[in-house]
Amino acid sequence: MFPRPWRDRALDRRELDEGYLAGHLTNIEVAAADGLYYRGLHHKDIARMLDDIPVIDDIRATVNWLRLRGIPSVICTLAWRRLGEVLAERYGFVGSSGPV
């Protein structure tokens, strides 16, 4: 079971999305607020949360193909930086970035 903030996340997330779409919040503000849900969580917990997200078919094979040809791949996300780090590790990107 995830910590309590994840159970209440749908309502908070909707408010953040609506505020962003209405122009009342910046991406950085949304990312900072969203990042509060990950504070204190272990890296393994965050990785587990991402187990069932949709990804491009054969992403690991593609990143590996590029790496073997000397082409580094970096994943950039509008989500929280720790999420990008998990995805970089999982799929073999050389690095990641995120707003917070």
Image (cartoon, rainbow, N blue to C red):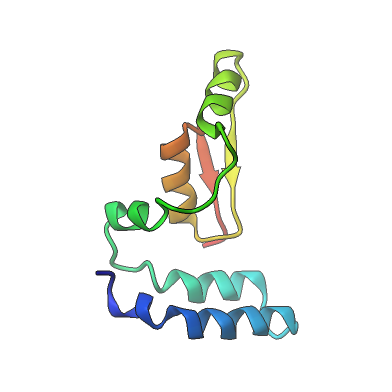
Q: Residue at x 70, y 86 (%)?
A: 24
Instruction: Give the side of residue 94 with respect to residue 76, left or right.
Output: left
* Residue 15, x across and y down, in percent: 58, 86
Q: Which residue is nearer to you in this view: 53 or 97?
A: 53
Instruction: Give the side of residue 13 with respect to residue 39, left or right.
Output: right
Q: Quadrant of residue 20?
A: bottom right
Q: In the orientation shown, which residue stands out farthest toward the top?
A: 69
Where does the N terminus fall, quadrant-wise? bottom left
Q: Residue at x 63, y 78 (%)?
A: 17
Q: Residue at x 27, y 74 (%)?
A: 3
* Residue 50, x across and y down, in percent: 42, 54
Q: Quadrant of residue 9?
A: bottom left
Q: Which residue is nearer to you in this view: 66 or 72?
A: 66
Q: Which residue is nearer to you in this view: 46 or 29?
A: 46
Q: How many marks?
A: 0
91 up-or-down from 86: above or below: above
* Residue 55, x across and y down, in percent: 55, 45
Q: Which residue is nearer to you in this view: 97 or 69?
A: 69
Q: Residue at x 65, y 70 (%)?
A: 27
61 up-or-down from 5: above or below: above
23 up-or-down from 84: above or below: below
Q: Quadrant of residue 14?
A: bottom right
* Residue 53, x across and y down, in percent: 49, 53
Instruction: Give the side of residue 47 with respect to residue 97, left or right.
Output: left
61 up-or-down from 49: above or below: above
